[in-house]
Amino acid sequence: MRFYLDACCLSRLTDDQSRARIREEAEAVEQVLAGVRRGAVELVSSEALEDEVRDNPSMERRMEAQTTLALAVARIEIEMQSPFVLGVWSDWAIVPSMRSTSRQPNPLRQTSC
């Protein structure tokens, strides 16, 4: 099983644990990481996540997150030429149907690429 933990998840380990919800979320992250250490779970990172972690002004939080990301077995790269990054998808709306999801041009939003 593969897990992608976003920057908020990674930060839970160094957040103030005095609130029950924060403590429970940190425990959930710890359980995922325990699975990583046992080899039952694979951690996935991304170029975008690594950039976000690198920009964290707190050295302690940044180092903790980078140490965790070092356990990742796969990394998702940002492809600057992908339609999503270029904004092409902004011209489309996802319209659910009974059988499947179809894409139709969004008349409310026009952009130029």
Image (tube, helix red, strand yellow):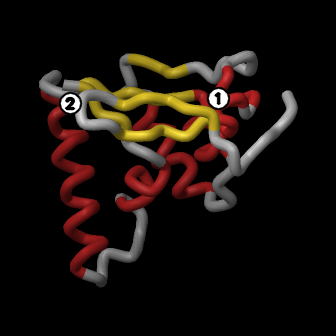
User: What residue do we see at 78% from left, 41% from top?
Assistant: 110
Looking at the rendered structure, the secondary structure element under dot 2 is: helix
User: What residue do we see at 69% from left, 44% from top?
Assistant: 107
Looking at the rendered structure, the secondary structure element under dot 1 is: helix
User: What residue do we see at 55% from left, 32% from top?
Assistant: 104
> Residue tagged by mark 2?
37
> In the image, residue 81 lies at what x, y percent?
74, 16
Q: Along the polypeptide, which appears first: circle 2 or circle 1?
A: 2
Marks 2,1: beta carbons within 8 A: no
Q: Is residue 93 left or right of residue 1?
A: right
> Residue tagged by mark 1?
84
Q: Give the residue at the far right of this rendering.
A: 112
Q: Which of 63 and 72 is in front in this view?
A: 72
Q: In this view, does 89 lie to the left or right of 24?
A: right
Write down the quadrant of residue 4 in the picture. Answer: top left
Label drawn at residue 39: none
> In the image, residue 57 lies at what x, y percent?
68, 59
Q: Nearer the viewer, residue 89 or 40?
A: 89
Q: Nearer the viewer, residue 5 or 93?
A: 93
Q: Which amino acid does label 2 sit on?
A: Arg
Q: What residue type is labelled 1?
A: Phe
For residue 1, above or below residue 14: above
> In the image, residue 89 lies at what x, y percent?
64, 32
Q: Spatial distance from mark 2 to mark 1, Cα to Cα?
A: 34 Å
For residue 70, above or below residue 5: above
Q: Label 1 neighbourhood size at 10 Å, few (<14), some (14-19), many (20+)?
A: few
User: What residue do we see at 41% from left, 18% from top?
Assistant: 74
Quadrant occupied by the C terminus? top right
For residue 8, above or below residue 79: below
Q: How many numbered marks does the figure carry?
A: 2
> In the image, residue 33 lies at what x, y percent?
24, 40
- Observer-side mark, 2 or 1, equals 1
